[in-house]
Image: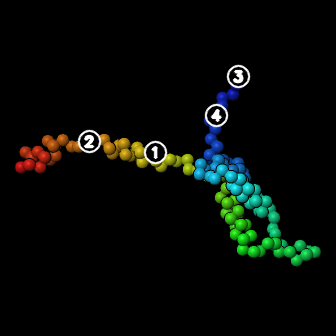
Amino acid sequence: MLPKQNGLNNAITTAKNGSPMKAGVSDGTSSFSRGKMLYTNAVHSNNNVPIASKKHFGSRDASSITERRKYQALGKSVVNATGEPMSLISTKNINDTKQALTRVRAGGYMVPPKQSGSKGRIYGLP
């Protein structure tokens, strides 16, 4: 007997340091995965600690600092460090709610003139 296959939902992950499915608006290049790799490598290293034999403080020019901050921001938002359920895309489609309300409100129902509360008046005529 074959085991029953469950539906694949890769939009949400609970794996520690796991990455869920990217949104459909990603650019399709390797910048996303490269940024995640640079973040995970940078988390475990400290470039600004001087080495005993040399006075090396790492790269401190403006472009290097900007690049490092960009990858840190990308990595913090992408890497699931705690193991909690995480998703990069919204699993709730707000358009479903809006379309349902539109269908309900567009029924075209009106109260019949005889039931409007005033006796002897039809369509506002005395």
| Label 1 sits on residue | 96
Looking at the image, residue 61 sits to the left or right of residue 111; the answer is: right
The front one of 86 and 32 is 32
Where 53 sits versus 38, above or below? below
**Residue 115 x/y as whole percent:** 16, 43
Q: Name the element at disc 2.
A: loop
Q: Earlier in the sequence, mark 4 or mark 2?
A: 4
Q: Are marks 1 and 2 in contact (CB under 8 Å)?
A: no
Q: Amino acid at mark 3?
A: Met
Q: CA distance from mark 1 to mark 3?
A: 39 Å
Q: Name the element at disc 4.
A: loop
Q: CA distance from mark 4 to mark 1?
A: 25 Å
**Residue 68 x/y as whole percent:** 73, 66
| Label 4 sits on residue | 6
* Residue 63 in sight here: yes
Q: CA distance from mark 3 to mark 4?
A: 15 Å
Q: Amino acid at mark 4?
A: Asn
Q: Earlier in the sequence, mark 1 or mark 2?
A: 1
Q: Amino acid at mark 1?
A: Asp
Front: mark 1 or 3 = 1
Q: Amino acid at mark 2?
A: Tyr
**Residue 6 x/y as whole percent:** 64, 34
Q: Dot 2: few (<14), some (14–19), or many (≥20) neighbours within 10 Å?
A: few
